[in-house]
Amino acid sequence: MKKGLIGKKIGMTQIFDENGKVIPVTVVEAGPCTVTQIKTMDNDGYEAIQVGFGDVKVSRVNKPMKGHFDKADVAPKKTLKEFRLDSIDGIEVGQILKADTFEVGEIVDVKGTSKGHGTSGAIKRWNFARLRMTHGTGPNHRHAGSLGACSSPSRVFKGKKMAGHYGHETVTVQNLKIAKVDAENNLIAIKGAIPGPKGGIVVIADAVKA
């Protein structure tokens, strides 16, 4: 990985390219992010940087984290994320990383927490087919149906698709293209959709090459 940023999903819109073609994009407030720690091979066994995003009141930070931020001489941050970079040369604690870290045309991976849907049925959660909504099939129109065999094995196998908690899990969308960068307002427009609701925290990083 060469670079990465933490951001906040603003929402979706559309822009036009030089040929007048519509491009659906997701706007992300990427940064400013502050480098809160640098991990080295000598001290930690690997090289990485820790980046903070979003200010938070000092009263809402516990003492160990307050000491961590005081040591770096930076204001407390709400979200911390570690990036293992190919090289940490030239990066210093307290350095500010902004949206212009990325350029138009670059391919990135975006990680976020998907929208939560609470407890959902098998149709919504797993796209099960429902029965015909006519007389004679009720009241089982949206039930999951039979769950397993009878006397053998006398149980339901683990991993069976059933109703339950749907969403609110870490999702990564790979190989998205950066369509526009507004360095002045720290905004990045990424072509396509990314995980999470409006206001959700996302992580933008270089695309992982196979």
Image (cartoon, rainbow, N blue to C red):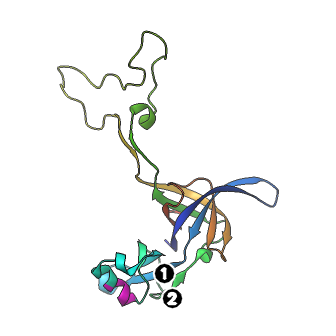
Q: Amino acid at mark 1?
A: Thr
Q: Quadrant of residue 102?
A: bottom right
Q: Which residue is mark 1?
A: 34
SS category of the residue bearing label 2: loop
Q: Is 126 in front, or is 64?
A: 64
Image-based side of 204 in relation to 12, left or right = left
CA neighbours of label 1 inside 10 A, class few (<14), some (14 to 19), many (20+):
many
Q: Quadrant of residue 23?
A: bottom right
Q: Where 153 sits versus 95, above or below?
A: above
Q: Is 80 in front, or is 88?
A: 80
- Determine the main secondary structure of the stretch shown in magenta: helix
Residue 133 in view of the camera: yes
Q: CA distance from mark 2 to mark 1?
A: 14 Å
Q: Where does the magenta region start and end?
A: 67-72
Residue 48 in view of the camera: no
Magenta stretch holds residue 28? no
* Residue located 58% across and 68% down the image: 29
* Residue located 24% across and 21% down the image: 149
- The disc at residue 90 is 2
Q: Nearer the viewer, mark 2 or mark 1?
A: 1
**Residue 135 at x, y percent in the picture:** 46, 10
Tally of numbered tags: 2
SS category of the residue bearing label 1: strand
**Residue 87 at x, y percent in the picture:** 47, 81
**Residue 14 at x, y percent in the picture:** 70, 55
Q: Where 165 sits versus 207, above or below?
A: above
Magenta stretch holds residue 69? yes
Residue farthest along the right direction in this orientation? 19
Q: Amino acid at mark 2?
A: Gly
